[in-house]
Image (cartoon, rainbow, N blue to C red):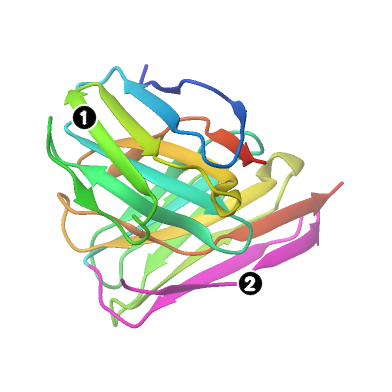
Amino acid sequence: GQQLNQSPQSMFIQEGEDVSMNCTSSSIFNTWLWYKQDPGEGPVLLIALYKAGELTSNGRLTAQFGITRKDSFLNISASIPSDVGIYFCAGQFTNAGKSTFGDGTTLTVKP
Amino acid sequence: DVKVTQSSRYLVKRTGEKVFLECVQDMDHENMFWYRQDPGLGLRLIYFSYDVKMKEKGDIPEGYSVSREKKERFSLILESASTNQTSMYLCASRIRDEQFFGPGTRLTVL
């Protein structure tokens, strides 16, 4: 299947710092999604992107759909301890098909 | 409120046993999915289903089968559990682009 490369694999940051992570693919997608998994829980959708070049915010989170349709970025501003978790990107071609998930970025925030 | 439940949070089985993992959603979603999650490997799709009695292989179906007799229930079956199937198993249902995940079942095969 398609491969998504997500980086970095893990991040250790101080509370208050900004965070950036990205996802690249060898294939194009027409939808990019970002999920967060809290410890002991299933992933939850944070942001969905539908158009190349689109920039979408959800509180302190901002995500972008790359112009080439082969990448996406997620930024978290002014991190707080509850941002801890695993962040997954996912790409898909249609709203009826399956999603391909990245390997995840594990975020640790030190108070 | 959207809810996906999985039958067990933790399960310990022996090699060779037949294992059933159950998933139920209360949102009347047509699409349901089974993933396994391993450190550094992300979420890998095992099987998915578009409707009752319909199933499609995902990226890693070997050693697994599924059953969808009712819309709300999607079962993952390990016909003969092996130690390399020790993992976290996540079920999800989907509406439009969003997948709703259950809390996961951590399966250990001894």
Q: Which residue is mark 1?
A: B68
Chain on which label 1 sits? B
User: In the rendered view of the protein, which quadrant contains the N terminus of chain A?
Assistant: bottom left
Q: Residue furthest right?
A: A111
Q: Is residue B47 visible?
A: yes
Q: Amino acid at mark 1?
A: Arg
Position of B76 relative to A71 (above/below): above
Asked if residue B105 lies left or right of residue A33, the reply is right
Image quadrant in which you'd find residue B99 = top left
Chain on which label 2 sits? A
Picture residue at 16% right of the left edge, 58% below the top: A94
- Depth check, front residue: B72 or A89: B72
Q: Is residue B94 visible?
A: no
- Mark 2, secondary structure of its residue: loop
Q: Is label 2 or label 1 in front?
A: 1
Q: Is A7 inside the magenta-drawn segment?
A: yes
Image quadrant in which you'd find residue A27 = bottom left
Position of B90 relative to A98 (above/below): above
x and y percentages locating residue A79 in the rendered image = 70, 51
x and y percentages locating residue A6 in the rendered image = 52, 71
Q: Is B31 inside the magenta-drawn segment?
A: no
Separation (CA) of disc 2 from disc 1: 37 Å
Q: Amino acid at mark 2?
A: Pro
Q: Which residue is mark 2?
A: A8
Picture residue at 23% right of the left edge, 65% below the top: A51
x and y percentages locating residue B109 in the rendered image = 62, 41
- Depth check, front residue: B8 or B110: B110
* Magenta part of the chain: A1-29
